[in-house]
Every structure is written in structure tokens, then in C-alpha cells.
Amino acid sequence: MKRIDLKNILITGSGSGLGRAMAIRLADEGYNIILNGRTESKLIETNEILKKFNIKSTIKVGDVSDSKFVESMISEIIEEWELLYGVINNAGISKGSASILDKNEKDMQKIMDINFKGAWLVSKYAAKCMIKQRELKPLRGKIINVSSIAGLDPMPGIGIYSCSKAALNMLTKVLAKELAPIITANAICPGYHVTPIYNNDPKLIQNFWDLINMKPLLKRVGTAEDVTGLISYLVSDDSNYMTGQIISMCGGVVLH
Ligand SMILES: NC(=O)c1ccc[n+]([C@@H]2O[C@H](COP(=O)([O-])OP(=O)(O)OC[C@H]3O[C@@H](n4cnc5c(N)ncnc54)[C@H](O)[C@@H]3O)[C@@H](O)[C@H]2O)c1
């Protein structure tokens, strides 16, 4: 069922994994999609899949932690498509498993730059446009941050990643407070989903669970598609009375 009046959504990190699954789900629902990521070939692959839907889509190749790129990406979107309705800050990295004592400064900086600073930059430039575009169309802007259950509880081996996602959760709440009532900001916390971040290997995830003794109550590894229903809800008008919320979508790992 198509229920969308051709709203434009930017999804960062949408060349693979959760971002690609979100792009397919939202395109199927009638949203126009702006794909972003660092690897052009992956974005082209996602864009090819979107061609079967009756929507507009485009690709913006670049690094979300580069402020010049983010500023020009958002102004290009406005020049080309006039309005930006929503952004999904999904781009993220984890950089392997190691004790926090063994992480080096370069990796720490990279994780924080992409997972936290990138989401802040995209939100900052997008929100300015969303506020301005209210003169053209009374849309409520939507910011959705893809965080992690590792941002709720410290996870051994991915401590810096945990810190970056905890910062992203706080960013979500700050954005919700500062941008209300024009823009809503919410975050989702996936658990363990088979994507390239885990080399598409369910065994790798299961080994990790054994290591940290945390298993989902629902007794299976997540798929990329498992998060897309929640994303669909968060970009839709059905969630207009919801902001500043951090929602887990993890098969019950956080209750274990
Ligand atoms: N897969 C999981 O189990 C899981 C669990 C919790 C949270 N997450 C989060 O979900 C998001 C998506 O991860 P995924 O599992 O789909 O893995 P993924 O590696 O397939 O997706 C991450 C995407 O981000 C892109 N990216 C990385 N750095 C970027 C940058 N500087 N600029 C633009 N794009 C960049 C990558 O190219 C990739 O396409 C990440 O934020 C991740 O932390 C994933």
C-alpha cells in the first residue's frame, strides 16, 4: 500500500546492510531516497534495486565525518529536490574487537568521527533546511539515529564503539529538545544483525554472544530487514507524537 506523498529521505551508509534494507523498505512505501556512503559501487547496487519502485532516488558519495562534504551534500539535495523530509543517520563502523586498553588513538578517533560526529554534522545541516522549508510546506522533519544496544550497556571488546553509540543516544535527546516542535529525533538500537559489519557471518555473532554471555530471548540472530518496520514507523506520521526516544530492536538481548 502506498501511503506517502513523495517525501525525500536521506539514508547514510545505505550501500550495504541495514541502510540498504531501510532504503528498499522506504522506497517500497513510496518515499524518495537519497543514498549516501563512501563506496560508489555499493551505492549503485542499492540504487539498481530501487529502480523497480516508482520513486526518485539518487546517490551522494562521500564521508559523513567530513563537514565540507556534508554541508555541500545537503545543499545539493535542496537545490535538486527542494525539500528534505527526513534523515537516517545509519553510517557507522566498529573496527574489530579488542580491550579498551589495546585500542589505538587513530581507531578511537575514527569511530567517534563516523558514529558520533558524522550523525551530528548531518543532523545539523539537515535540520537547518528542515526549519527553513517550513515556509514552503508545513512538514514535520524527522531525524532517526541508528545507535546500538552497545550504547545502552558496555559491551566487552567494543568499548569505544559503545561510547560512540552512547554519545549518539545523548545527541538524539539533545536534538529532540532543541528542535521541538518542528523536528522529531529518535534512535533505534539494533542488537546483532547479519550484515557486513559482522562479515555477514552469523557464527561470528554467536561466538561473540558466547563470549559476553548475552543471547537474544527470541533465540536467533537478527536480519537487516528486522529493523525496517521500526524505521518505517519512525519516518511516518504515526510517530509524530514521539521524540527523544531510544528504542531497542534486538530480539530481547537487553533483557538477558
Ligand atoms: N549489524 C548489527 O548487528 C548492528 C548492531 C547495532 C548497530 N548497528 C549499526 O547499524 C549501522 C549500519 O551497520 P550495518 O550492520 O548495516 O553494517 P554495514 O557495514 O553494512 O553498514 C555501514 C555502512 O556505513 C558506511 N560508512 C562507513 N563509514 C562511512 C562514512 N564515513 N561516511 C559514509 N558512510 C560510511 C559503510 O560504507 C557501510 O555501507 C551502523 O551504524 C552500526 O553501528 C549494526
Image (cartoon, rainbow, N blue to C red):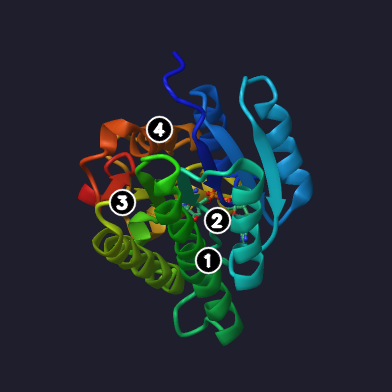
Which of pointers 2 and 1 indicates the residue nearer the eye? Answer: 1
Q: Is residue 2 visible?
A: yes
Near-viewer residue (20 or 140): 140
Figure quadrant of residue 120: bottom left
Mark 2 vs 1, N-terminal side: 2
| Residue type pointed to by label 1 | Gly
Q: Amino acid at mark 4?
A: Ser
Q: Look at the numbered disc 1 and say if its residue's Cβ is closer than 8 Å to ligand 1.
A: yes
- Residue located at (45% from left, 49% from top): 133
Identify which residue, 165 or 170, lies in the foreground.
170
Report the residue marked by disc 4: 232
Q: Is mark 2 within 8 Å of ligand 1?
A: yes
Which residue bears the numbered disc 2? Answer: 91
Say whether residue 178 is left or right of residue 29.
Answer: left
Q: Which of label 3 and label 4 is nearer to you?
A: 3
Distance from Cα at disc 2 to Cα at disc 3: 24 Å
Amino acid on which disc 3 is placed: Ile
Q: Which label belongs to residue 118?
A: 1
Q: Are the residues tagged 2 and 1 within 8 Å (C-beta)?
A: yes
For marks 2 and 3, give the one nearer the viewer: 3
